[in-house]
C-alpha cells in the first residue's frame, strides 16, 4: 500500500544526512568512515522513502543494491547517481566498526555528495508529485 506520509518522513531524514555530508568536506575533521556512513544513510533512507511512496515493502537491509533492485523490479527508472553509490553499503555496518582502508584512492567526497544530492532531489520530486 502506498504510504506518502512515511515516504516524506524518510525523505526528511535523508535530507538531514545529506546536510551532514555537505558539512564534511574536510578529511582532517571527519574521517571517511563517518562521511561514508552519512552518505550511505542518506541514500538508503531516500530509496526506502521511494519504495514507500510506490507501496513496495522493503526488507530490513542496508544493502543499497538490493533496495535499488526492488525499485527496478517495479519498473521504476533509477538515476545513475544512485547506481554509482551502491558501494557505500559497506559503510552502513562493517565500516562503522572497522577502519576504512583505501584500495586505490580516497573517497571523492565532492562526487559522492553530488550523486547523493542528485538522488535525494529525484526522490523529493517524486514525493512532491505524489
Image (cartoon, rainbow, N blue to C red):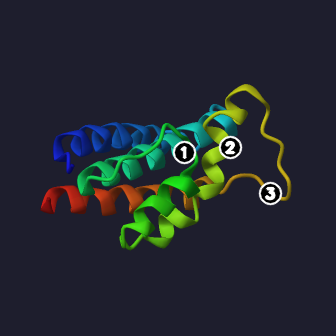
**In 3D space, how far apart are the residues under numbered discs 3 and 1 (Cα atoms)?**
18 Å
* Residue indicated by mark 3: 105
Q: Residue at x 49, y 72 (%)?
A: 80
Is 64 above or below relative to 129? Answer: above
| Residue sitting nearer the eye, 130 or 113 | 130
- Residue, disc 1: 40
Relative to 14, 9 lies left or right: left
Q: How many neighbours does mark 1 have within 10 angstroms: few (below 14), some (14-19), or many (20 or more)?
A: many
Count neighbours of disc 2 (C-alpha within 10 A) and say few if under 14, some if 14 to 19, many if 20 or more.
some
Q: x%, y% of residue 109?
A: 60, 53
Give the tally of numbered discs: 3
Report helix, strand or loop for mark 1.
helix
Nearest to viewer (mark 2 / mark 3): 2
Residue 68 percent location from the top left of the image = 48, 60
State the CA–CA distance, disc 2 to disc 1.
8 Å
**Which numbered disc flags the more N-terminal residue, 3 or 1?**
1
Where residue 11 sits: x, y (%)?
A: 30, 45
Are dots 2 and 3 in contact, CB under 8 Å?
Answer: no
For label 3, count other residues whose C-alpha is less than 10 Å away and answer few (under 14), some (14-19) or many (20+): few
Q: Position of residue 100 (x, y in %)?
A: 78, 39
Labels 2 & 1 near each other (Cβ < 8 A): no
Q: Nearer the viewer, residue 32 or 80?
A: 80
Q: Residue placed at 60% from the left, 37% from the top? A: 92
Residue, disc 2: 90
In the image, is 57 to the left or to the right of 82?
Answer: left
Residue 37 showing in the rendered view: yes
The answer to which of marks 2 and 1 sits earlier in the sequence is: 1
Identify the element where label 2 is drawn: helix
Taking 68 as reference, is 17 above or below it? above
CA–CA distance in space, label 2 to label 3: 16 Å
Q: Is residue 105 left or right of residue 3?
A: right
Amino acid at each position: 500500500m502506498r504510504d506518502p506520509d512515511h515516504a516524506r518522513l524518510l525523505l526528511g531524514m535523508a535530507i538531514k544526512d545529506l546536510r551532514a555530508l555537505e558539512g564534511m568536506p574536510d578529511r582532517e575533521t571527519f574521517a571517511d568512515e563517518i562521511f561514508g556512513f552519512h552518505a550511505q544513510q542518506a541514500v538508503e533512507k531516500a530509496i526506502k522513502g521511494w519504495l514507500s511512496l510506490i507501496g513496495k515493502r522493503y526488507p530490513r537491509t542496508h544493502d543499497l543494491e538490493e533496495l535499488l533492485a526492488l525499485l527496478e523490479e517495479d519498473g521504476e527508472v533509477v538515476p545513475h547517481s544512485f547506481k554509482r553509490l551502491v558501494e557505500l553499503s559497506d559503510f552502513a555496518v562493517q565500516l562503522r566498526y572497522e577502519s576504512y582502508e583505501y584500495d586505490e584512492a580516497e573517497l571523492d567526497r565532492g562526487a559522492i555528495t553530488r550523486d547523493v544530492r542528485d538522488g535525494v532531489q529525484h526522490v523529493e520530486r517524486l514525493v512532491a508529485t505524489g
